[in-house]
Image (cartoon, rainbow, N blue to C red):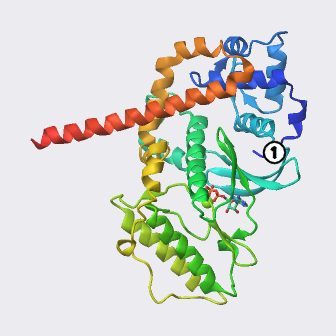
Amino acid sequence: MKLDVTGMRYLTKDHFKVLNAVEMGMKNHEIVPVELISSIAKLRHGGVSKILSHLLRNKLIAHDGTTYDGFKLTYMGYDFLALRVFMKHGHISGLGRQIGVGKESDIYMAVQPDGTEVAIKFHRLGRTSFRAVKNKRDYLKHRKQVNWFYLSKLSAMKENAFLKALYERGFPTPTPIDANRHAIVMSLVDGYPLNQVRRMADSKGAYDACMDIVVRLAECGLVHCDFNEFNIMINDEGKITMIDFPQMISTSHYNAEELFNRDVQGLVKFYSRLQHGSYIPDEVPKLGDIVRDAEMNLDVEMEASGFTKQMAKDMETIHELTVGKDQHDSEDEEANDSEVDEDENHDEDDELDEALAAELQAKIKALQGDEKCEDNDSDE
Ligand code: ADP
Ligand code: MG
């Protein structure tokens, strides 16, 4: 569904209070009962039903098709919540056209109050690959719905953490501007994805710039794992920008060398196949020859930030734990949530999610510890 924000200006503070209430309710409910929405939103002058029907008409919430007793957030509703925060922060003043679509993301142009154009990436997990995983494992057989909003948020937080870390260390990435929920605001890259390029005047220069990034990442302890012509942008002057860091891994990962070589070979293949000005290097870098930069332990730093390869690897566990957590804590959270004042909702909400993320990470670690213990036991 296309994201249309023309209706946003007709939404009042109360509309957002209700939308926010639906979001909060979804931590514990697949479909949030109207009474719960009402008790979280605590509108001074009532009128929740009218607002809910307005939100429903504008496709910001949905019902399950059989009853109007409860609602769930749509991705558009989730988008609006994030956009509102970006607007409150003064980071964007309007949304423009869609400029990119990935398997699990939508990228839009947006404009800042001073007229500068920026990019917003909305993570949309659950659209493709996870659905496949879900089917394969028969996830829904004995479980409730997976919370895709929450997983999209984790995915965006992870990307934002990498974006900031790489940008701060001088990698040619977009400039990070803001992040909220499942969305990231960054500078708009001047250029186009490399896969659209068929001919190049200085292909050696561009190849070197790309390979430099691969090597510098490895010096910092990271392998990109998806460093190909779809995730590299180039402008008319040949300037290279790397975008999209979905599945970086540590160079100490057991599979790092193979994945490093795959990134390298992908680049070699791309540059050797250009219709005009193709380039073939004499030799290519090897992971074993790259000297680690003692000052740069990005893999360890990212690991510590809690949004890492661990998340991807243990996505399966996370699904399980996310759903489990929701069931266990529903009573407590409902009680807490309804105490929260609207203006503090975002922070409170973020804290809740961060606490949850930390808890998940701890649980995963514990699970892995258990696994190791079990292995040890069986070895003895
Ligand atoms: P995905 O993770 O779904 O692959 P990407 O981050 O690779 O998403 O973005 C998809 C497409 O959107 C890119 O190929 C590019 O065309 C465009 N895009 C992404 N980020 C930017 C940006 N900061 N500036 C300009 N275009 C962008
Ligand atoms: Mg991509």
Residue 10 visible here: yes
* Percent coordinates x, y for residue 285 in the rendering: 43, 78
Tag 1 secondary structure? loop
Residue 10's x, y, as percent?
Answer: 90, 30
Q: Nearer the viewer, residue 203 or 173?
A: 173
Q: How many marks?
A: 1
In the image: residue 239, left or right of residue 359: right
Percent across and percent down for residue 147 are 56, 33
Res. 375 image quadrant: top left
Check the image and report above or below for 371 versus 159: above
77 and 43: which is toward the camera: 43
Please give the name of the residue rendered at 21% of the width and 37% of the height, measured from the top-left corner: 373
Which residue sits at x=78%, y=33%? 59
Q: Say if disc 1 is inside 8 Å of ligand 1.
A: no
Q: Which residue is more in the foreground, 15 or 29?
A: 15
> Going by the picture, which residue comes out furthest to the left?
380
Q: Is residue 281 left or right of residue 26?
A: left
Q: Mark yes or no: residue 145 visible.
A: no
Please indicate whether residue 91 sits to the left or right of residue 232 in the image. right
Residue designated by label 1: 92
Q: Is residue 205 above or below residue 153?
A: below
